[in-house]
Amino acid sequence: MSNLERRPVLATSADDLPASHSTPELLTARDVDLGDGLPVRRLLPKRGHTTVGPWCFVDHFGPIDARPGLRVPPHPHTSLQTVTWLLEGTVLHRDSLGSEQLIRPGQLNLMTAGPGIAHSEESPPGRPDVLHGVQLWTALPVAAAARPAFEHLAELPTAATRGLRLTVLMGELLGARSPASAYSPVVGADVAAGAATDDDLPLRPDFEHAVLALTGPAVVDGAGIGPGSMAYLPPGRDHVAVRTTGPARLLLLGGAPFGERIIMWWNFVAHTYEELAAAHADWQAGSARFGAVTGYPYGPRLQAPPLPPGRLVPR
Ligand code: MN
């Protein structure tokens, strides 16, 4: 999915605070309307928390009535990966590499932008009435030199504890390793409780983590979360306690603290303001850098909003 805001806020990790909390910090979502009646809970970026590991963008949408239909016209991305994970519904993805892929619950769509890619997303005909999922981005390190790529992983590795069933989207957890391409140390896992649970998950002490609730309330190391909130866990922990009073779906996101300054604005991640301005100019000029999405049936590609004025050089 895209950041369809017409006046996107510039977020820079230069404003982030050092992590020094012994209990989880509760982060709450900002409600954002993506247009066409698609409200999302935006959990990242947040002031003070641009990134958790390489994760730099977390939108949780639904469950909502998908019958009006999702229509996200072709738009660009740079220096990031889009990670799409659904609990309900279906979405059709098209990109400028020529990919055309339907995604269903339990499958992962991973698109690596590298220097530039474009894609669109739409509700296919005959879809279920309900849409529920997350759109995540990971930031790419400068040195990654990642090329534009699209991966559809129809099956992902799973693991289980006493009370939790895990699906590993990226990285490795409990011996299960996702084949998804990654460019910095990362973990992402769907954590499902089928019933009331009181259990632990192992964490890498060199990673920071966040746990968000996709359904149901849960208590994460003593912090209550529900849809629209997320518990942030700084590095230095080797496990997290997860309690639920019934069925729940959680998302565990983490990684080594990103350590590189990034700028996020609209659908671009950049490492300098000059890089951001060049990406903006190239997209507006129709540069071959982003390629072209073919087959999107609902109109022209998105135009970028004007770059915001003012002092935009990151500190
Ligand atoms: Mn997108």
Image (cartoon, grey):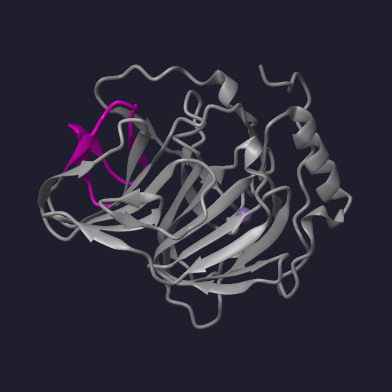
> Residue 115 placed where, x, y %?
73, 47
- Residue 73 appears in view: no
At 68% from the left edge and 54% from the top edge, which residue is drawn? 147
Can residue 135 be seen in this snapshot? yes
Please identify the quadrant where the N terminus is shown.
bottom right
Q: Residue at x 71, y 71 (%)?
A: 98
* Residue 157 position (above or below residue 183): below
Is residue 173 magenta-colored?
Answer: no
Quadrant of the rendered image holding ligand 1: bottom right
Q: Tell me, yes or no, whether the highlighted magenta stretch contains residue 240.
A: yes
Give the side of residue 77 with respect to residue 169, left or right: right
Q: Split into 4 quadrants, where in the image is the C terminus?
A: top right
Query: Looking at the image, is 132 positioned above or below residue 312?
Result: below
- In depth, the one of 302 and 164 nearer the eye is 164
Q: Is residue 140 left or right of residue 28?
A: right
Q: Is residue 295 left or right of residue 13?
A: right
The location of residue 10, given as percent across then percent down, is 65, 30
Q: Residue furthest bottom?
A: 126
Q: Nearer the viewer, residue 120 or 146?
A: 146
Q: How many marks?
A: 0
Residue 288: percent from the left, percent from the top? Answer: 85, 57
Residues drawn in magenta:
215-242
Q: Residue at x 58, y 50 (%)?
A: 81
Residue 218 falls in image quadrant: top left
